Every structure is written in C-alpha cells, then in structure tokens.
Amino acid sequence: MRIALILALLAAGCGRQGKAPQVLAVLPEFSMKAIASRAEPPFGRKDMLGSVWVVDFIFTRCGGPCPVLSAGMAKLSKELPPEIRLLTVTVDPEGDTPAVLRDYAAAFGARFPRWVFLRGTAEETYRLLYAGFKQPMSIDAKAPPPERVTHSTRFVLVDRHGGIRGFYDGLSEPDNAAMARDARRVLEAGL
C-alpha cells in the first residue's frame, strides 16, 4: 500500500514538473530605447508580445555580478531555441551610454534583434524594475562607479502575453537550467 501511495505521489509530481509555470504578474506598458547597431528605436511591452523572453538587469561598470549575468545570457543565446529572445536592461542609464552598451553587447556576442539591450531615463528604469519586473534596485551616487548600483541578479521569464512566469537566480547554474527548461515549456505550450 505504501509503495502504491509513493508511486502515485511521484507520478503526480512528475506531471506537475512538465507544465509551464503560472503567471505571477503582468508587465505594464513601458517605453525605453533599444540599443541597436546604429539606431535607438523605441522598445516597449508591445514589442515583447508574441515572443517568450528571458530578461536580466546589468550595468557595464559593475564591479560584481553583471559580467557573470551577461555570460549566462550569452550561454542561453546559444542553448535556447531562437524563438526565445533575450532582453538586458541597464540600471545605470547615466554611465551606460548607447556607445558603451553597444560595445558591451558586442563583447558578449549579442545579436540584435534576438538579444535586445534597453536604456531609459533613471525614472523609466526605476518604474520598469519596481512596477514591471518586481525587482529591487538602489543607487548610491557617492559610491565609486563599480559599486554605485545595487540591483537584482535574477533572470525573469516573460511569456508571449507579457506575463511574468518566473524569477531565477542568474548566478546559479541549477536555477539557470530550471529557467531554460521553463522557457522551453512556455514556448512549446504557446503561452
């Protein structure tokens, strides 16, 4: 009897593991600038609709985790199906000029339009992180540039309808593997 109960629980758990994660929040409307090869077209929620996205937050003068996050995104760009797109939002619009972001993106092999880098005003950035992606961020203007911004190191999975499906520790290989698995499930389910 115990063995049957254990097998039933395992089977139920396996079924749940095969499903796409549920919607945790929905992105609001926003508009920032996409940093492309020579242009800076507007980019917002409407541009995300219709595609599955993995999103992260960095700044190029970061003295901590940002290069690791960007390397993780570069790895995902090679491992995930091309229909899953990548979005990196700078949390330091003052320091991350379009030219600086273009160079940074090139250093990690980012190819627009699959991997989009966004830059907005400080107010747009705060609003997008807090209200949109539900992520923390703070700036200490007196700190040296590599330590000026404290921000989330999470990857965020967004579905085709602008629904946030998950938050994953971008510095954790197991979390990155779970996010990649969930991104594929969201894509396959047409969500």
Image (spheres, grey):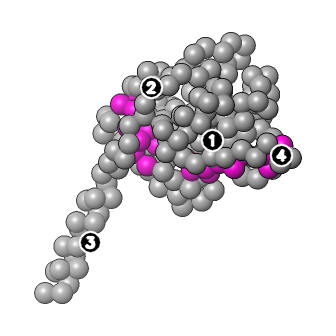
Can you name the residue that lies furthest to the bottom here?
2
Q: Name the secondary structure under disc 2.
A: loop
Kindly report the distance in space between the C-alpha atoms of the residues bearing marks 1 and 2: 18 Å
**How far across and down, in percent of the image, does residue 174 sit?**
54, 61
Q: Name the secondary structure under disc 4.
A: loop
Kindly report the distance in space between the C-alpha atoms of the residues bearing marks 4 and 1: 21 Å
Residue topped by disc 1: 57
* Above or below for 99 versus 175: above
Which image quarter is the N terminus in? bottom left
Q: Name the secondary structure under disc 3.
A: helix
Q: Earlier in the sequence, mark 4 or mark 1?
A: 1
Residue topped by disc 3: 10
Under mark 3, the amino acid is Leu
| Of 181 and 169, the residue lying toward us | 169
> Would residue 66 be counted in the magenta stretch?
no
Q: Earlier in the sequence, mark 3 or mark 1?
A: 3
Kindly report the distance in space between the C-alpha atoms of the residues bearing marks 3 and 1: 37 Å
Residue topped by disc 2: 29
Under mark 1, the amino acid is Phe
Kindly report the distance in space between the C-alpha atoms of the residues bearing marks 2 and 4: 32 Å
Under mark 2, the amino acid is Glu
Are the residues at dot 3 and dot 4 in contact (C-beta closer than 8 Å)? Answer: no
Under mark 4, the amino acid is Lys
Kindly report the distance in space between the C-alpha atoms of the residues bearing marks 3 and 4: 53 Å
**How far across and down, in percent of the image, does residue 147 sit?**
80, 49
